[in-house]
Image: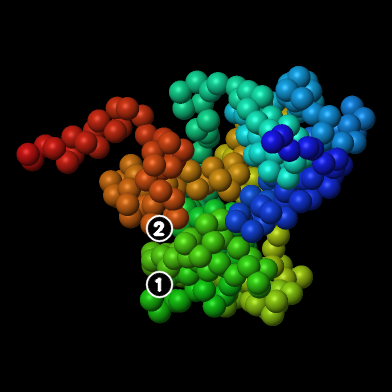
Amino acid sequence: MTRELEPIEPKKAVELYLAQKQEDASERTVQAHRYRLNKFLEWCDLEGITNLNELSGRSLYEYRLWRKDDGNLNTVSLRTQLCTLRTFMRFCESVDAVDPELHDEILLPTLDTNEDARTEMLDPERAQEIREHLEQFEYASRNHLIFEVFWSTSARLGAVQSLDVDDVDVDSQSLAFRHRPTDGTTLKNRDSGERIIALSDETTQVISDFIDHTRPDVVDNHARRPLVATDNGRMSQSNIRALTYSMTRPCQYGDNCRCAEKHNYSYASRCEWSRSPHTLRRGSLTHLLKNDIPKEIVGDRADVSTEVLDKHYDQMTQEEKMEQRRGYLNNI
């Protein structure tokens, strides 16, 4: 027996989908899906679509063309957008909002081999230059703390932002990453992403001195003492990201500005030589792998599987990988 469709407005369907998504996905994933589907809602408004029952394979293809042009998306970004739309359409099918199997009408663009693996990273040589500059001219500053934690832990932006003073154990030289959704911060992989990692003498000293001499004596909205703090409490992820872009510009650590146009702090991300927190993570992980740290240990430390390490973070050239293997095989 064929099930009849029940009329539903696009916005209501998205709200129901996101509510369901919150039950089995991280807040960051839910936010990403909300952003992508907001574009779909925008298109529905433009096309006058007030009932999802009207959708067809042709209309979804028209959305694909509009989304690609509207956002000037590359193949990888377009595929990501359409994957979310397909997942949303499966949900809509389950609540009798669209025709059964409509999600199959959404054709995903084909990627070339490794096209979806980003390659931009902060080179270890540049990282060392930045660390030396911060050590000499901005010791135990907030910039110094942020960069040192990113590079030495290979952590994600959300994990660094979630750190508290109490997560630092100076005596054991360790740092604990905790998933605390009821207290305002989360880890990407939730409870499974929790871990305690060892710190070097130098990193421990920087963190300790920052806490003792630089950090504002504040708490956040949950009465926690954030490690990366401002006078108003826990620093937002967007501000941490902006600081990272700014401090990784060559002109900020003593090198000549290489940009055709001078960018101030607010537009530091436009500098082609500036780097985001994720490129610090990628560079740090690649640096560990180049130094023969086993992938299992690197993965446990950074909360990432060996498969993802191979695909997204191992930026060694084939020649570098050959020499690394040679080091293990020379004595056999």
In primary-sequence order, the first of circles 1 and 2 is: 1
Q: Which residue is drawn at the image coordinates 29% and 33% (left, top)?
A: 321
Q: Which residue is mark 1?
A: 173
Q: Which residue is drawn at the image coordinates 55% and 67% (left, top)?
A: 179
Whether residue 322 can be seen here: yes
Give the quarter of the figure containing the N terminus: top right
Q: Mark 1 is on which residue type? A: Gln
Task: Please tell me whether mark 1 or mark 2 is closer to you in this view.
Answer: 2
Give the quarter of the figure containing the C terminus: top left
Name the residue nearer the viewer: 315 or 308: 308
Q: Is residue 323 above or below residue 105?
A: below
x then y, percent, for residue 328: 17, 41
Indicate which disc residue 63 carries.
none
Circle 1: element type: loop
Q: Is residue 288 above or below residue 86?
A: below
Picture quadrant of residue 159: bottom right
Q: Mark 2 is on which residue type? A: Arg
Q: Which residue is drawn at the image coordinates 69% and 80% (left, top)?
A: 223
Q: Is residue 4 above or below residue 170?
A: above
Callout 2 crowding tier (Cα within 10 Å): few <14, some 14–19, many ≥20? some
Name the residue nearer the viewer: 72 or 231: 72
x then y, percent, for residue 93: 70, 39
Callout 1 crowding tier (Cα within 10 Å): few <14, some 14–19, many ≥20? some
Picture quadrant of residue 316: top left
x then y, percent, for residue 330: 11, 37
Whether residue 141 can be seen here: no
Q: Which residue is mark 2?
A: 301
Q: Is residue 229 above or below residue 189?
A: below
x then y, percent, for residue 173: 40, 72
Name the residue nearer the viewer: 26 or 311: 26
